[in-house]
Amino acid sequence: MNPTAIFLPALAMAVLTFFVWWRMYFTRVGQMKRDRIHPQAVASSAQSTALLTDSRAADNFRNLFELPVLFYLALVVAAITELATEVTLVLAWLFVALRVLHSAIHCTYNKVMHRFMSYALGGFVLWILWGYLALGLLKG
């Protein structure tokens, strides 16, 4: 396996985060222009919550820095311990696919149970990835 292949899912997650960031930017700036909200009026998160009505992209953007942090670490651990195998690569891409689905749901129609299922499945895949890494590390 190509030793850099394990980092391609991380690149995909970075691209996803970039797209959600752009969506958040255009959503917020668009509403601020439409509703004539001065930037200083949303200086704090409490003020933003009170004035900006569509927080889907912002909520998803924050979410992309929760579980994915463990994902990025798992890829680094896999790479430096030579545990970057086809199994880790498949699990990594599956996690990315579920995060893309989660973000798509969250940033569009936002049906909570659909979003939760993609989140829970992604979390489950991440725990399997860490379990696989743990077994490899413990075998030493």
Image: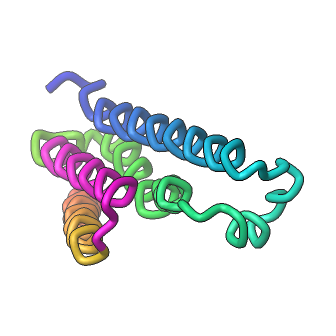
| Residue that appears at 53% across and 41% down | 21
Q: Which quadrant of the structure image shows residue 116? A: bottom left
* Image quadrant occupied by the C terminus: bottom left
Q: Is residue 18 above or below residue 53?
A: above
Who's the residue at 21% across and 47% down the image? 97
Asked which quadrant contains residue 5, the reply is top left
Give the quadrant of the N terminus: top left
Tell me the magenta residue range.
Answer: 88-111
Horizontal side of 44 relative to 29 (left or right) equals right
The quadrant holding residue 10 is: top left
Name the one closer to the observer, 24 or 138.
24
Q: Percent x, y for residue 66?
A: 49, 63
Prevailing SS of the magenta stretch: helix
The residue nearer to you, when weighing 80 against 61, is 61
Report whether residue 107 is seen.
Answer: yes
74 is higher (above) or lower (below) than 53:
above
Residue 24 position in % (x across, y down): 55, 46
Query: What residue is at 31 percent from the left and 60 percent from the top?
Result: 109
Locate residue 38, reporting x and y percent: 84, 49
Residue 134 in view in this figure? no
Looking at the image, the residue that sits furthest to the bottom is: 113
- Apparent side of residue 104 relative to residue 25 in the rendered image (left or right): left
When the figure is inspected, residue 91 is found, relative to residue 8, above or below; the finding is: below
In reply to whether residue 108 is colored magenta, the answer given is yes
Is residue 37 toward the left or the right of residue 71 in the image? Answer: right
